[in-house]
Amino acid sequence: MESRTTSALRLLGLARRAGAVAPGTDAVRRAIREGEAQLVLIAGDASSTQVDKVRTTMHDRAIPQVILGDRNTLGAALGLGPLTAVAVTSESLAEQLARELEVPRDEGGTDAVEA
């Protein structure tokens, strides 16, 4: 499982370099509203307030969600400070990440899969 997570974090870094991520709660919510978010990654130690903001924005949208690492790990994967959430906006990179983390692509709604 550790190797899957490490590989997923590398893919996340690749997505950042490709300009295919929306890092941070506000950017994630914007990407969701604009229909750009293909996969939402949430830090395992994210505050319930921040998670609720993201999930409220996702209301009735079938976007897969994954709990991945903690805020420091998620931010470090992107070369940034601690992050509560990240949206992947590239469909192909989101599919690669979902495959790596063994997340069904039809997962959505308010239930997050823990990786």
Image: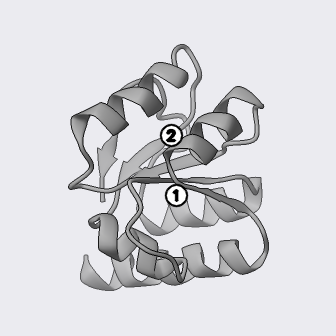
**Visual colour scheme:** one colour
Viewer-proximal residue among 96 and 69: 69
Q: Earlier in the sequence, mark 2 or mark 1?
A: 2
Q: Are marks 2 and 1 in contact (CB under 8 Å)?
A: yes
Where disc 1 sits, the SS reads helix
Q: Position of residue 39 (x, y in %)?
A: 57, 48
| Residue type beneath disc 1 | Ala
Q: Is residue 15 left or right of residue 64?
A: right
Q: Give the side of residue 77 with respect to residue 37, left or right.
A: left
Secondary structure under badge 2? loop
User: At 59% across and 35% down in the image, what residue appears?
Assistant: 29
Tell me what residue is drawn at x 59 percent, y 21 percent.
Answer: 61
Residue 79 appearing in the image: yes
Question: Is residue 10 rendered to the left or right of residue 1?
Answer: right
Q: Residue at x 74, y 53 (%)?
A: 91
Disc sitting over residue 98 in the figure: 1
**How far is disc 2 from disc 1 in space, using C-alphas?**
8 Å
Tag 2 residue: 64
Residue 100: percent from left, percent from top? 48, 69
Q: Quadrant of the C terminus?
A: bottom left
Image vertical order of residue 90 relative to residue 52, above or below: below
Residue 78, compared with residue 21, is above or below; it is below
Q: Position of residue 93 (x, y in %)?
A: 69, 65
Mark 1: few/some/many CA within 10 Å (<14, 14-19, 20+):
many
- Up the image or down, 110 lies above or below 101; here it is above
Q: Nearer the viewer, residue 41 or 96?
A: 41
Residue 15 falls in which quadrant of the image?
Answer: bottom right
Residue 106: where, in percent of width, then height?
54, 34
